[in-house]
Amino acid sequence: MLRLIFLGTLLITASACARPHADGAELVVAKGCIACHGTSGKATAPSYPNLDGQWERYLRLQLMAYRSGERQNGIMNGMAATLTDEEIRALAAYYGR
Ligand code: HEC
């Protein structure tokens, strides 16, 4: 229980603003998404897809498909493997519309 409280405090302290702890703007940095998809979803190189302007629902379903292995890609299967449902929701909402 104490450990949970400690973790909670850490999460709250770690998030710069008072939004819920799965914060898209922080997750894209923490998870490394920005290296390829940029901070706004505009890809950093032609070999990576742009995510900006895409439907939130589409992005969410793709991340779930990468996580389950239903959609296969050497990079994205690894990136999505450890994402929680909450993180996927936040990431899709951040990059999508
Ligand atoms: C090393 C580069 C790299 C990183 C880091 C990366 N991606 Fe990707 N991402 C790709 C590539 C390449 C594809 C296209 C894969 C394919 O063809 O299925 C892709 C595809 C996607 C798609 C599907 C786009 C579509 O139009 O179907 C989503 C959503 C996505 N990435 C989100 C993320 C998120 C969120 C993160 C961070 C957790 C992330 N990516 C990290 C390279 C990267």
Image (cartoon, rainbow, N blue to C red):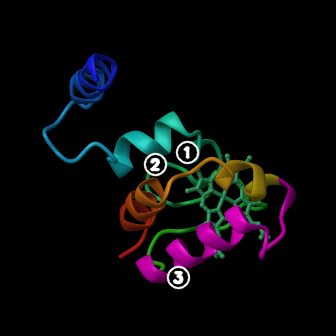
Q: Is residue 58 magenta?
A: yes
Q: Is residue 55 visible?
A: no
Q: Residue furthest left?
A: 18
**Helix, strand or loop for disc 2:** loop
Q: Quadrant of residue 34?
A: top right
Residue wearing tag 3 = 58
Q: Earlier in the sequence, mark 2 or mark 3?
A: 2
Q: CA distance from mark 2 to mark 3?
A: 19 Å
Instruction: Say which mark, if any, is on residue 4.
Output: none
Q: Which residues, given as a range, are shown in magenta?
A: 56-74
Which residue is at the front of the view, 86 or 26? 86
Q: Position of residue 3 (x, y in %)?
A: 33, 18
Q: Quadrant of residue 67?
A: bottom right
Q: Position of residue 82 (x, y in %)?
A: 63, 47
Q: Is residue 73 left or right of residue 65?
A: right
Amino acid type shown at disc 1 = Ile
Q: Residues within 10 Å of mark 3 (few under 14, many from 20)?
A: few
Query: At 62% across and 74% down in the image, what residue appears?
Result: 62
Q: Is residue 91 left or right of residue 21?
A: right
Q: Cβ–Cβ below 8 Å for labels 1 and 3?
A: no
Instruction: Say which mark, if any, is on residue 39.
Output: 2
Q: Main secondary structure of the magenta part?
A: helix
Cβ at disc 3 under 8 Å from ligand 1: yes
Above or below, comparing residue 59 to residue 90 in the picture:
below
Amino acid type shown at disc 3 = Tyr
Residue wearing tag 1 = 34
